Image (cartoon, helix red, strand yellow):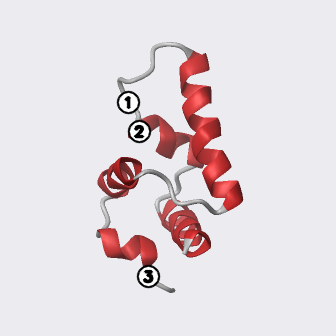
């Protein structure tokens, strides 16, 4: 389930010509003030992606808002 989720996120990012860092930056806009805080969030989410773990539900909700997609699109097979 996690690998399908991350494959779909990768496809959606490619369609929108966004990088993973831009996604994380938009997801957590206003919540970090120092580069170290951003990198901590980035590394945490990248670790989830690398290990095919599903992120926290609130982070998935933020991805849905940033990517402007339906929740089900993140779990659909392409």
Tell me which residue sits at (46%, 14%) in the image. 33
Residue 78: percent from left, percent from top: 51, 86
Label 2 residue SS: helix
Labels 3 & 2 near each other (Cβ < 8 A):
no
Residue 70: where, in percent of width, then height?
A: 29, 70
* Placement of 28 over or under 76, stated as above or below: above
Distance from Cα at disc 1 to Cα at disc 2: 5 Å
- Snapshot quadrant of residue 73: bottom left
- How far across and down, in percent of the image, does residue 67 sit? 37, 57
Closer to the camera, 75 or 22? 75
Q: Which residue in the rendered view is the most extreme toward the bottom?
A: 78
6 sits to left or right of 56:
right
Q: Secondary structure at mark 1?
A: loop
Residue that badge 3 annotates: 76
Q: Position of residue 41 (x, y in %)?
A: 55, 33
Residue appearing at x 54%, y 21% in the figure: 37
Q: Is residue 74 above or below residue 29?
A: below
The residue identified by callout 1 is 29
Q: Residue at x 40, y 48 (%)?
A: 59
For label 3, the SS is loop
Quarter of the picture containing the N terminus is bottom right
Q: Are marks 1 and 2 in contact (CB under 8 Å)?
A: yes
Question: Looking at the image, is mark 3 or mark 2 earlier in the sequence?
Answer: 2
The residue drawn where x is 58% and y is 48% is 20
> Label 1 vs label 3: CA separation?
27 Å
User: Which picture quadrant has residue 31?
Assistant: top left
- Count how many numbered circles sit on residues in the image: 3
Query: Farthest residue in the top direction?
Result: 34
Q: Which residue is mark 2?
A: 26
**Residue count near mark 2 (Cα–Cα under 10 Å), binned few <14, some 14–19, many ≥20:** some
Q: Is residue 73 left or right of residue 45?
A: left
As drawn, the label of residue 39 is none
């Amino acid at each position: 389930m996690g690998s399908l989720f991350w494959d779909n996120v990768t496809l959606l990012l490619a369609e929108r010509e966004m990088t993973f860092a831009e996604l994380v930056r938009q997801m957590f806009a206003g919540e970090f003030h120092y580069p170290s805080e951003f990198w901590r969030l980035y590394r945490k989410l990248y670790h989830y992606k690398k290990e095919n773990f599903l992120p926290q539900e609130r982070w998935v909700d933020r991805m849905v808002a940033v990517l402007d997609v339906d929740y089900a699109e993140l779990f659909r097979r392409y």
